[in-house]
Amino acid sequence: MMHKTTLPGRTAKFGFLGLWLVITLFPLYWITVTALKSPGAIYKFPLQYWPEKISFDNFAGLFNQANFGLYMVNSLVAASVSGAVVTVISLLAGYIIARFEFASKGAVVMAFLVTQMIPAFIALGPLYMMMTNLNLVDTRGGLIVVYIAMCIPFSTIMLRGFFDNVPDALEEAAMIDGCSRLVALFRVLVPVMLPGITAAFIFNFVNCWNELFLSVTLMNSDSNKTVPTAISGFITSYNIEWGPMSAAAVMTVVPTLIMFAFASKYIVQGLTAGAVKG
């Protein structure tokens, strides 16, 4: 029996959602406002919730006085390559775990889950020593390798869940028609699972794009810094450069917003429907 929502109930629901939306969006709004203020207006009291005069000096300073464009390229390369490689590897690994039975299957899945419970900074010391011995410190390739290793476990478990929701009959029918298992995977299952694969790639991209501890530890030279490392550089022992830091934060959010805007349909389908098509 359907229960009709009363007016007070709807008011409370929308009021709660509105409050949650304000709390969620206000930090982004305040960062944007701070980035659009002139350097002198940032510290002016009383606080201005909208700048009297919009200024792009903070954004211009990022590219004129710092190598922020290079930092953006470094982050884009590291996040894109890592996200793509992790998605492909996790696709194959998730398929094997979902479709095959082997003796150590439970142990492998448990190991993937346990790695997600361990904070990344605990392994920074041993990881730095290992990367030093491999001559991969302060290189884009070394950072990408670490990002790939970091993202594979969760991404594999995520894609395994999508495979579990796709009927075996799809690939079995393709194999009866003469396809090999690998061909059936990429020609039949991948198109069906495209929303889930897209969601996994975006998760991996955003995770690598926002990562700080590993990039700070492994990247020493200014030419190899990523965006999160560059933003942390605006905080010194004696001062916090709020204007440039806010402008950098806005520039950091833009790529992820564009990605979510174009792929939101696939993300919603992948995370809610499990990529099952009737």
Image (cartoon, helix red, strand yellow):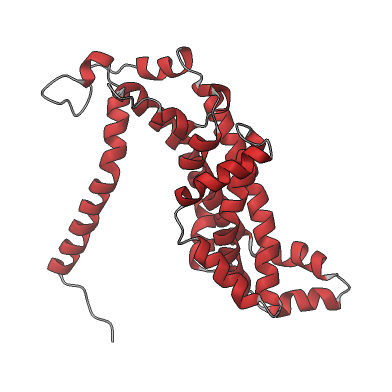
Q: Position of residue 6 (x, y in %)?
A: 16, 72
**Residue 22 vertical position relative to residue 215 in the rendered view, above or below:** below
Instruction: Determine whether, in the image, residue 79 is placed left or right of residue 235.
Output: right
Residue 198 in view in this figure: no
What residue sits 63% from the left and 34% below the top?
A: 140
Residue farthest along the bottom direction in this orientation: 1
Q: Does 19 sit left or right of 86 as displayed?
A: left
Residue 37 x/y as whole percent? 27, 20
| Residue furthest right as drawn | 178
Which quarter of the figure is the C terminus placed in?
A: bottom right
- Residue 235 visible? The answer is yes
Q: Nearer the viewer, residue 222 or 206?
A: 222
For the N terminus, the image quarter is: bottom left
Of residues 162 and 208, the one nearer the viewer is 208
Q: Quadrant of residue 179?
A: bottom right
Within the image, what quadrant is residue 131 found in?
Answer: top right
Q: Residue furthest left?
A: 46
Identify the residue at horizontal 28%, vertical 82% (top origin): 2
Q: Position of residue 34 (x, y in %)?
A: 28, 26
Q: Is residue 142 left or right of residue 208?
A: right
Residue 75 image point, x, y percent: 55, 34
Position of 64 relative to 90 (above/below): above
How many numbered marks have been drawn onto this rendered protein structure? 0
Q: Kindly identify the residue that appears in the image at 19 percent across and 65 percent down.
A: 10
Kindly identify the residue that appears in the image at 62 percent across and 70 percent down: 108
